[in-house]
């Protein structure tokens, strides 16, 4: 059984546009399915198209916590995590589902056609260390290939693997980088994420964030979570030392107040909830595996 | 805020021994390389502005040079137009004078034409008078000629009559010849 988990924050119109396609794609996969819409504090969803079950959160907590709540309420063996502004093709879910079961695979990500992607596809990602920090870039390919993380707007994974990883880290709430963190933690446990170009979907492009968050707030949170990702995930001593040097450079020379605010918040959040980095491959080894074909 | 954040970061670095002898080079590399990127990013708008200003400056210099050339060309053109204007004024004055002269000439010719027409009319009238006089003379001449012919015929008849008188009527014949001579004298006086 596949459980589609769709968090939304007042996105009724987007759900009306896209849930029908989600149901059709799930049905085409040929097994049982359900749709769990997580009402992330917006309310007033009313009757939704198709057999969607609504899990209502009392207040807006952000994308990661909403997905976690949906995963907890889901009953399927697999989770199809979706943004409410994603439109699936009929074959999308089946193409992703075909990659499982695979004990080495955490998640499968389709080709995500999106105005946010420079190359037109948000799905494929790779990382490299530059000037002390991990930089993420888009990767396109004709065939399935390892990717750094399952982009939050659309991926399929075993629900057990998601829960075993602890789901999205609430420290990244309300948005940005929780998916990078999740995928990196999976790689650190030896679980791959695959970009599967033969599966495809369309992403309107951060519709909720654009509607409800200011540009400054998005910049602050994005930078905060970028810092937090490094603090909570890098394990190679030389990488950590270089990244701390890089953050010191930001503290000394960065001019944008929202970034400096995000930097301070990241260190405060990390100090408040220290993250245990377990044993596993080095950061360099993870990026090498992502880059392998 | 930046100072507090820096303290937090350095505290974390000390705690993680990121600025210990074994790892301080990595810390410094991250600091140095990232600082370079941040400063480049901060300077980029200024550099872009400088590049833009330099381009604008070059464009302005080129524009000034172009405008200077254009100005010189316009001044030359202005001088040429002034000269042309003077020439046209002179030509205009000359044409006006010529026009006035031609107008005078036209008036003179019109007057002369009128005079010639008057003379022509006068000559026509004179010719008509001459013709009428000629016709009158011809008629008078014809009448006189007819009269003379009549006189000559009468004289001839009188001579013939006188020649036919008998000898003894020679006195009558002489009287008739004397009358005839007196009549001829009257007609030829």
Image (cartoon, grey):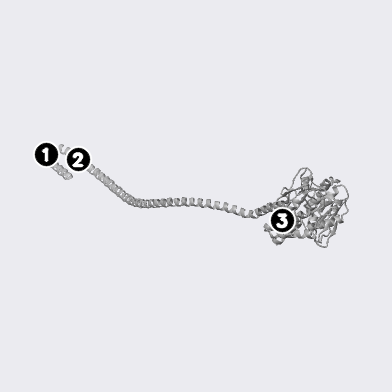
The CA span between labels 1 and 2 is 22 Å
Q: Residues within 10 Å of mark 2 (few under 14, many from 20)?
A: few
Q: Quadrant of residue B45?
A: bottom right
Q: Residues within 10 Å of mark 1 (few under 14, many from 20)?
A: few
Residue B142 in sight from this viewpoint:
yes
Is disc 1 placed on a helix, strand or loop?
helix
Kindly identify which chain the residue marked by label 3 belongs to: A
Is disc 2 placed on a helix, strand or loop?
helix
Q: Is residue B69 above or below residue A59?
A: above
Q: Is residue B85 left or right of residue A278?
A: left
Q: Is residue A211 left or right of residue B188?
A: right
Q: Is residue A44 left or right of residue A249?
A: right
Which is more toward the observer, B56 or A104? Answer: A104
The CA span between labels 3 and 1 is 189 Å
Quadrant housing the C terminus of chain A: top right
Mark 3 or 2, closer to the camera: 3
Residue A262 in sight from this viewpoint:
no
The CA span between labels 3 and 2 is 168 Å
Is disc 3 placed on a helix, strand or loop?
helix
> Can you identify the residue that label 3 sits on?
A247
> Can you identify the residue that label 1 sits on?
B170
Q: Residues within 10 Å of mark 3 (few under 14, many from 20)?
A: many
């Amino acid at each position: 059984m596949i459980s589609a988990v769709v968090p939304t924050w007042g996105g009724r119109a987007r759900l009306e546009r896209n849930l029908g396609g989600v149901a059709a794609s799930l049905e085409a996969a040929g097994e049982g399915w359900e749709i769990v819409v997580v009402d992330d504090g917006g309310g007033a969803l009313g009757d939704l198209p198709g057999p969607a079950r609504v899990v209502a959160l009392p207040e807006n907590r952000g994308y990661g916590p909403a997905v976690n709540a949906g995963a907890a309420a889901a009953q399927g063996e697999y989770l199809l995590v979706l943004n409410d502004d994603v439109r699936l093709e009929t074959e999308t879910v089946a193409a992703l589902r075909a990659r499982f079961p695979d004990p080495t695979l955490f998640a499968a990500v389709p080709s995500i056609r999106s105005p946010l992607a420079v190359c037109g596809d948000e799905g494929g990602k790779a990382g490299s260390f530059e000037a002390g920090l991990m930089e993420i870039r888009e990767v396109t390919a004709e065939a399935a290939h390892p990717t750094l993380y399952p982009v939050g707007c659309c991926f399929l994974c075993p629900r057990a693997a998601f829960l075993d990883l602890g789901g999205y880290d609430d420290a990244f709430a309300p948005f940005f980088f929780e998916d990078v963190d999740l995928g990196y933690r999976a790689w650190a446990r030896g679980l791959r994420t695959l970009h599967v170009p033969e599966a495809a979907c369309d992403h309107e492009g951060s519709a909720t964030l654009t509607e409800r968050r200011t540009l400054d707030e998005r910049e602050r949170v994005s930078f905060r979570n970028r810092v937090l990702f490094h603090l909570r995930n890098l394990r190679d001593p030389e990488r950590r030392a270089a990244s701390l040097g890089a953050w010191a450079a930001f503290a000394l020379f960065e001019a944008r107040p929202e970034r400096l605010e995000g930097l301070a918040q990241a260190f405060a959040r990390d100090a408040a909830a220290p993250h245990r980095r377990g044993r596993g491959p080095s950061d360099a080894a993870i990026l090498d595996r992502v880059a392998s074909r | 805020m930046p100072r507090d954040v820096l303290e937090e970061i350095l505290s974390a670095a000390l705690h993680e021994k990121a600025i210990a002898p074994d790892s301080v080079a990595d810390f410094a590399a991250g600091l140095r390389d990232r600082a370079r990127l941040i400063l480049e990013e901060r300077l980029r708008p200024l550099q872009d502005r400088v590049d833009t200003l330099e381009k604008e400056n070059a464009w302005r210099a080129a524009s000034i040079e172009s405008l200077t050339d254009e100005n010189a060309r316009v001044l030359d053109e202005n001088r040429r137009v002034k000269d042309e204007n003077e020439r046209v004024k002179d030509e205009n004055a000359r044409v006006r004078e010529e026009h006035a002269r031609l107008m005078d000439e036209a008036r003179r010719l019109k007057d002369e034409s009128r005079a010639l027409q008057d003379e022509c009319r006068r000559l026509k009238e004179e010719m008509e008078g001459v013709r009428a006089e000629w016709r009158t003379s011809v008629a008078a001449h014809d009448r006189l000629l007819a009269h003379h012919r009549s006189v000559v015929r009468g004289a001839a008849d009188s001579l013939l009559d006188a020649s036919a008188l008998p000898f003894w009527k020679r006195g009558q014949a002489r009287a008739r010849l004397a009358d005839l001579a007196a009549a001829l004298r009257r007609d030829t006086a």
